Image: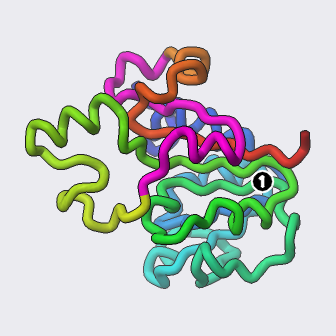
Amino acid sequence: MSSGVSGLLPNRTHFAKLAYGLILDCGCGKGLFRKILEVKGEVVGVDVNRQNLMRSGYKNCVLCSATHLPFKERCFDFVWVCALIEHVEEDCIQEISVAGKGKTVFLTPNPHSPLNILTELLGLGGWFSSKCPDHIRPYTIDELKSFGHVYGDSCGLRRFYKLVPSFWRFFPWLSHTIFLVVDKQK
């Protein structure tokens, strides 16, 4: 099942489509979500890798680390952080969230998902194994809940994607990757 946008999964596009106004794509990489985010507002892409920034396609790019963002507090309406925080040794959730005045949405692997545990037991490598050497900072669901609401992304099985968001809202620990939504508007 495709979302119709670059083959992205519906769960991920669901959260990306919440974007509006001035948007920060923190750790934008090669601009995987650019088409969705640019429809929603003006986007600033940030990445620590110059080549990724050049490939992202964003008009507004800033070369910097997520742990040292050069922006004023609460200057973005929406902050999108997909597959970044597991690559940063220190906890950077608070640092990134400070840049937003609305929602900040993070997507990160769930090290305790049944599928991850199974792949580790079978010797196939998990999220934080030698097969993924750049994954250095696992977050538990309880850690993430201390910042905001946690939702599951999927359990790695395509047929379950259509159950978003209701099923994954109540059973995030079954999900292979998880969303954290920090909402400053409340």
Rate crowding at label 1 as few (under 14), some (14 to 19) or many (20 or more) other CA atoms within 10 Å: many
**Residue at position x 67%, y 45% from top?**
146
Residue at the outermost left position: 123
**Residue at position x 19%, y 58% from top?**
131
**Residue at position x 51%, y 15% from top?**
163
Q: Quadrant of the N terminus?
A: top left
Q: Quadrant of the C terminus?
A: top right
Q: What are the residue bounds of the magenta stretch?
A: 138-162
| Image position of 139 with respect to 74: above or below | above
Say which quarter of the image contains residue 28: bottom right
Say which quarter of the image contains residue 17: top right
Residue 149 on the magenta segment: yes
- Circle 1 sits on which residue? 78
Q: How many marks?
A: 1
| Image position of 12 with respect to 1: above or below | below
Residue 140 lies, in percent from the top left, at 48, 44
Residue 172 lies, in percent from the top left, at 51, 28
Between residue 58 and residue 151, name the one nearer to us: 151
